[in-house]
Image (cartoon, grey):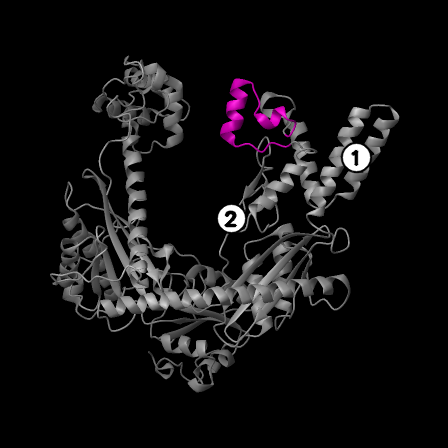
Amino acid sequence: MADPSSYRPKPGQIPDSPGVYKFRDEHRRVIYVGKAKSLRQRLASYFQDLAGLHPRTRTMVTTAASVEWTVVSTEVEALQLEYSWIKEFDPRFNVKYRDDKSYPYLAVTMNEEFPRVQVMRGHKRKGVRYFGPYGHAWAIRDTVDLLLRVFPVRTCSAGVFKNAARTGRPCLLGYIGKCSAPCVGRVSDEEHRELAEEFCDFMAGRTGTYIRRLEQRMTDAAEEMEYERAARLRDDIEALKKAMEKNAVVLADATDADLMAVAEDELEAAVQIFHVRGGRVRGQRGWVTDKVEAVTTGDLVEHALQQLYGEETGDSVPKEVLVPALPDPVEPVQEWLTERRGSNVSLRIPQRGDKKALMETVQRNALQALGLHKTKRASDLTTRSRALEEIAGALDLDSAPLRIECYDISHLQGDDVVASMVVFEDGLQRKSEYRRFQIKGFEGQDDVRSMHEVITRRFRRYLAEKERTGEWTNGENASSGGTSDGASADGTSTDSAPLGNAALEGDTTGNAFAGNAFTEEDGRPKRFAYPPQLVVVDGGQPQVAAAKRALDELGIDDIAVCGLAKRLEEVWLPHEDDPVVLPRTSEGLYLLQRVRDEAHRFAITYQRTKRAKRFKASPLDEVPGLGETRKQALIKHFGSVKKLRSATIDQICEVPGIGRKTAEAVAVALAQAAPAAPAVNTATGEIMEDEEVGASGTTTGSPEEPVSAGASHERRGQET
């Protein structure tokens, strides 16, 4: 635990101007980002008597080892830079609203030739119209099922659509009238797009005009004694009204607004948002967060607005945002929202009328969400804390292992040997820290040697990071195994491209970072930079001994090691002849099992990916500069790799996009590659002709030579 006075800036060093500041821990990891109208006044508040600080603020300043800042010209720039850094560094002490799910949206893919209505989650895509978010996916499907009667828009996947177009027969929805079947030409692409636009208009709230038009058409049909058509229109109107009932009218027609309410206590806060479009509640979402310092309700609102609209532009930001308290000052936030939308945005507190009444409903939802979260979290925190304490007691550790790393080796009969590293912090998965390895030191199957190699490579990189930052003083040990392992994880380099050019005005650690605020040295998450308190390996005594030997060879003696054997779920320690047996009901054992199983899942997934790539290998893969598009163009032009192999260089040059130099490289690669065995139809036993299977480009060896009978199925054998 650091003393804040040890890194407090000198008097007069901090400028009295707007800016953004960062606190770092001893590993140079950014742990808190904040903004201030006056950097001098704001930072001075952190270096007062510890007894006067908020408990979590006190924890933050004692965890930190340095502070630095960046000066900006306006408060709006500070707001934007703060949001960017929070997204970039993911500081552990910042207010971050996290929900336990990705909210589903009703999406219409207007960027496709034949727009499709579907449920979507995750990041929004360009050219797609979104409605929601909804609390449950089934709510979207119920609404869509009602509306398809009136707006028979395509809902099928690309594969189903192409298959129907190929066979000339629509899917079931086309037969029962819930799809206009553009796949078989029942409607043109213009007519189908018009249907999709009407669907979007209805979902956007322009319902009254459309229903009145349908009612007039129903009346006209009845007067003309076309009673069947009138009955269909009547049923359409009833379906639309039923869909509208799912979203009750709460505000005046055409009102677009987001209403936000906050329920809080001393340690936590819950935020609830209602999305009102066209006067109806179209979606709802909520988050719960820890309060890191003594923030006001206005501060919580500001953080929520940043995370709610930080990635949004245009109509995704409503004209009106109603909140329980305004940020102080409110002008920069309102200016920022206006900039995101492209037109004026009103940010205010509702005082009376329907909006005030709806805000009270949102507030009740926030209070209920906070109460439910506290009930769940009390159990979760207690369970996780007990699990970590049990592990510390069983392994005789000085403190609970807040960061646990687990390693597993995976292969198929000695081929495609890979390893995984998963990370749990405070008993929870930290997926952004997961890493994958390819075993390169030897060929064949040897789990013990593989484990030794992986542990060595991982912690060699850790020592290299410490040496680079000056934390590791024994340069001989740090460099004994080399200081670079550039392709050890994910096959990628650890060098980071610059992401910004904001100059740091001050750095109390004595390091000057000129011109770039997002370099690795400036706090961006680095691979393998942070040590665990406990290393878990999937295996028994041999694997544990290999991991311990690797750490000893690197001179690391402050990291505990254990192994979890699958057969009896025994915990093995280095230099111990007998395992530690935890009770079957132990929370500590359950946590170790979860960590081990996650490492196994991650390793198996990577191993299967590598195996699939090897099975799909082609001689064309060896041609430098030949991408997937030009490979497919070659196969499409010649029909198979066998025909491509027999083609002359001049004939290859006839393919669009293929120059003479590339054609020569293709000819050389195909000439050097040995043809694979002929494919056998496993159903009939006959040898298949190349033309029947060669154009797919997805077989072993080369695209025209499909997998033989023995290799056409997944190779038998135990996958580990």
| Residue 185 vertical position relative to residue 15 in the rendered view, above or below | above
Q: Residues within 10 Å of mark 1 (few under 14, many from 20)?
A: some
Along the polypeptide, which appears first: circle 2 or circle 1?
A: 2
Query: Would residue 491 appear left or right of 361 to someone viewing this image?
Result: left
Tell me where residue 162 appears, x and y as whole percent.
51, 25
| Residue 567 vertical position relative to residue 198 in the rendered view, above or below | below
* Contact between labelled residues 1 and 2, with CB atoms less than 8 Å apart: no
* Pointer 2 residue: 123
The Cα atoms of the two marked residues, 2 and 1, are separated by: 36 Å
Tell me where residue 645 appears, x and y as whole percent.
28, 18
Q: Residues within 10 Å of mark 2 (few under 14, many from 20)?
A: few
| Residue 211 vertical position relative to residue 355 in the rendered view, above or below | above
- Residue 214's tag is 1
Query: Would residue 91 appear left or right of 287 to someone viewing this image?
Result: left
Q: Which amino acid, by three-letter code, is at mark 2?
A: His
* Pick the front one: 652 or 263: 263
Eye-nearest disc, 2 or 1:
1
On the image, which quarter does residue 624 sit in? top left
Q: Which residues are magenta?
A: 153-178
Tell me where residue 161 appears, x and y as whole percent.
54, 27
On the image, which quarter does residue 348 sit in? bottom right
Based on the picture, tell me whether residue 210 belongs to the magenta stretch: no
